[in-house]
Image: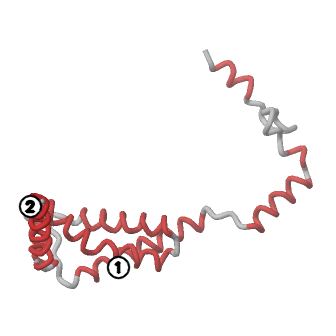
Amino acid sequence: MALSYGVDARVRADHDTEAARSDVEIVVAINNGDAAAFEVLYFRHRDWVAGLAFRFTADNDASLDVMQETFLCFLRKFPGFRLTANLKTFLYSAVRHLAIAARQKAARYQTTAAELEQLEHLRSRNPAHAGDCQTGQAAPGQLDLAHPIRRLVP
């Protein structure tokens, strides 16, 4: 029981020591090669970054991706990163930029109901050009690649 208390006290003391350090002091430590200092900043700001990312993306998975990309972007700035303002100012602009990029990328790959309806309409108008997806037979006017592909297999 005493050993457990000692471990808890040491962890709590380490956390209190790190919590007392400012972001500027931690950035200086990271620039000096202290890898554990980055972890402190990550745990200090990750919930805020994730919440902000969710507000921009409105999607849990996308917000976690944005959070990860934000901290990767931040990590790539070292060594040599100078914190000239509040760290949240830097993080906010990174999250905003990455979230907008993620939303634009997702929008490019979204298929709307109108697009699906249009595809069905085109297929129903001219089924001869659709080809047979089940058998692999080419529709009239399309290249039949089955024979050349069979010849390539040893």
Amino acid type, mark 1: Ser
- Circle 2 packing at 10 Å, graded few (<14), some (14-19), many (20+), is few
Q: Position of residue 80 (x, y in %)?
A: 14, 67
Q: What x and y, as percent, mark residue 135? A: 81, 32
- Report, in whole angstroms, how far the alpha carbon at label 2 lies from the one at label 1: 47 Å
Q: Residue at x 22, y 84 (%)?
A: 86
Its colouring scheme is secondary structure
The structure residue drawn at horizontal position 37% and vertical position 68%, both measured from the top left corner, is 67
In-image side of 27 versus 109 (left or right)? left
Relative to 83, does residue 133 appear above or below in the rendering? above
**Percent position (x, y) of residue 97?**
41, 75
**What's under tag 2, amino acid-wise?**
Ala
Quarter of the N terminus within the rendering: bottom left
Residue nearest the viewer, comparing 83 with 17: 17
The numbered disc on residue 2 is: 2
Q: How many residues crowd around disc 1 within 10 Å: few (fewer than 14), some, or many (20 or more)? A: few
Q: Which residue is mark 1?
A: 93
Left/right placement of residue 71 relative to residue 18 reads right
Depicted 11 relative to depicted 92: above or below:
above
